[in-house]
Amino acid sequence: RTVLFVSHNMSAILRLTERCLVLDRGRIVLQGPTAEAVDHYMTAGDVTSGERRWTDEDGTRAANPFRPIALRVLDGRGRVAERVASTDPFTIEFEYELRNELTGLRVGLYLATSRGEPVFTSFDTDASQQFEAWTARPAGRYLSRCQVPGNWLNGGTFVLGVNASAFRIRSFFTEERALTLTVDPTGAPGSHWSEPRSGPLRPALTWDIVEAA
């Protein structure tokens, strides 16, 4: 027996089905496993080119004196990439301009699954030495970047968000769905087993196997 279940409720679809059709104006745009179809549906319309750029026409004037310029994902060779390998490290880079000096600024990244499940939040002044070195930032153009280690994320679609704020004083700029990133799990830890791994992380943990006395 085949049951056709039609819904916009993603949790119900994930719970009740194994394969899905994604329709756009009556046309099939994807047919495949449920998790893949849900990722596609949730990120439709998101920026997926590996780079997001902002202009003053994007409504960013309210962030003044902070001006976002671009958010990029860079592969191991420093190239803009919309798809990275789970086994390789990659860099997330946020470019911005300060039109005058700011004190206490912190620039951060949010990583979430395509379904909105948080994976991590990180700011460029989380380390105390960075906080002390950049308590005041003069006017100018900046790059805040961090590296995500290899053998850490599971395969799937992730969403990057950005934030610029002075803690408990003012939020200058926030965009929670700035860029979409695809992680390819080929060769990831345990990929010689055929079953899928649940969750957003797939770390390469160090194991010892010894004979018990």
Image: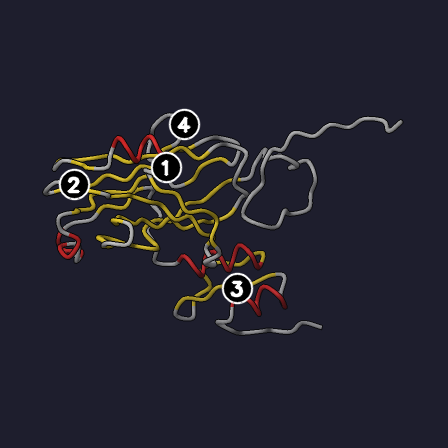
Query: Residue at coordinates 45% horizontally, 44% vertically from top-left?
Result: 182
Return the residue nearer the eye: 102 or 163.
Answer: 102
The reply, left or right, for residue 115 in relation to residue 199 is left
Q: Residues within 10 Å of mark 3 (few under 14, many from 20)?
A: some
Observer-side mark, 2 or 1, equals 2
N-terminal-most mark, 1 or 4: 4
N-terminal-most mark, 2 or 3: 3
Q: Which mark identifies residue 97?
A: 2
Q: How is the image coloured?
A: secondary structure
**Circle 1 residue:** 81
- Amino acid marked by disc 4: Gly
| Spatial separation of the CA atoms under disc 1 and disc 3 | 27 Å
**Circle 3 residue:** 21
| Spatial separation of the CA atoms under disc 4 and disc 2 | 26 Å
- Amino acid marked by disc 1: Ala
**Circle 4 residue:** 76
Query: Residue at coordinates 25% horizontally, 49% vertically from top-left?
Result: 166
Image spot of residue 91 (x, y percent):
38, 33
| Spatial separation of the CA atoms under disc 2 and disc 1 | 23 Å
At numbered mark 3, what does the secondary structure look like: helix, strand or loop?
strand
Query: Residue at coordinates 48% horizontally, 30% vertically from top-left?
Result: 88
- Amino acid marked by disc 2: Glu
Image spot of residue 180 (x, y percent):
38, 49
At numbered mark 1, what does the secondary structure look like: helix, strand or loop?
loop
Image spot of residue 212 (x, y percent):
86, 29
At numbered mark 4, what does the secondary structure look like: helix, strand or loop?
loop
Image spot of residue 186 (x, y percent):
56, 36
